Image (cartoon, rainbow, N blue to C red):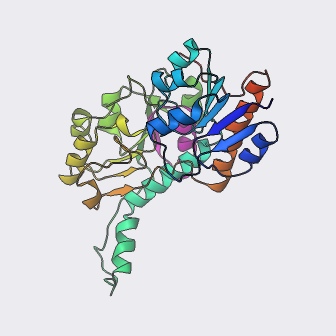
Amino acid sequence: MRKKIFVTREIPGDAINFLSKHFDVKVNAEDRVLLREELIENIKDMDAVLCLLQDIIDEEIIDNANKAKIFANYAVGYNNIDVKYAKEKGIIVTNTPGVLTDTTAELAWALLLSVARRVVESDKYVREGKFTEWKPNLYLGQDITGKTLGIIGAGSIGKAFAKRSRGYDMKIIYHNRKRDLAFEEEFKAHWVDKETLCKDSDIISIHVPLTEETRYLITKKELDIMKETTIIINTARGPVIEEKALYEALKNKKIWGAGLDVYEKEPEIYPGLKELDNVVLAPHIGSATVETRERMAMMAAMNIEAVLNGREPITPVKLK
């Protein structure tokens, strides 16, 4: 008897076809996140679940996955899953690390350059027919070259982001739970505490997972000590920044600008943030390239295939 898999939403590439060769696969046909009761109904009697970051896999959901051997998360982050409880129930949790590293770092740089050079504002200005002549003071932005880059989180994405700074001759400082001597040597980077990073950085880019330690890592306290010319980029997780405090800092020009791909109460955005010109907003597209999203899907599928056939998963989430 073929084992059964539920996929919580249509995903790109050949992953579904790959799984269908080995198992019976049911895919959510709705182009939306399932309601809680719908998710519960669909995961009953399933041997595996391929889920998305928007699917909240808590104790109740896990208890209703009465036959599941694995939750394969279609994301590198896994704060949507109660990994500890899943482990207690003998269920494996996997994610998709590595494959989206460069893609997310590239998006962070796209946001940074867009904010620094006011690209979105300028585009809107041209489209509205306001560009009638060259002006000496028209949309003056900031140089990137030679500036101090503060990286919060020197994991794989943080390092990929740093790598792309080399052409801009930037001074790199970073804050991480632990010093990374190899990172320091390769990039001539200096570890500093969070307060020093916030005070000294011209640009701050955040690359940390969402944990209890990193929730509200940046609040009014940190924003108040930043330079008026500071640019902050977040492609990590929304709740790392207190969005209300960020809005106030941007509105009152306490900092230069921000580039955001994630939000505190996603997909909701703090009221007023969309009306500000000094913030560039993206709809959580850090991994959104054809190649990367297809690789993510296949990695999740291969984790399921391995576990259901009695082998070790490729990328298990391990409790720290």
Res. 166 visible in picture:
no
Q: Is residue 209 left or right of residue 163?
A: left
217 and 274: which is toward the camera: 274
Q: Quadrant of residue 242?
A: top left
Numbered-mark total: 0
283 and 172: which is toward the camera: 283
For the point 71% across and 31% down, the residue is 304
Q: Position of residue 294 (x, y in %)?
A: 68, 49
Residue 170 colored in magenta in the image: yes
Above or below, 290 against 90 in this view is below
Q: Is residue 1 left or right of residue 317?
A: right
Above or below, 277 against 252 in this view is below
The quarter of the rendered structure image containing the N terminus is top right
Q: Which residues are magenta?
A: 152-173
For the point 34% across and 63% down, the residue is 141
Residue farthest to the top?
Answer: 88
Q: Quadrant of residue 125?
A: bottom left
Residue 286 colored in magenta in the image: no
Q: Is residue 234 left or right of residue 294?
A: left
For the point 41% across and 45% down, the residue is 262
Q: Position of residue 312 (x, y in %)?
A: 75, 21
Q: Position of residue 96 (x, y in %)?
A: 63, 36
Q: Position of residue 265 (x, y in %)?
A: 34, 41
Residue farthest to the left?
Answer: 252
227 and 35: which is toward the camera: 35
Q: Is residue 34 left or right of residue 298?
A: left
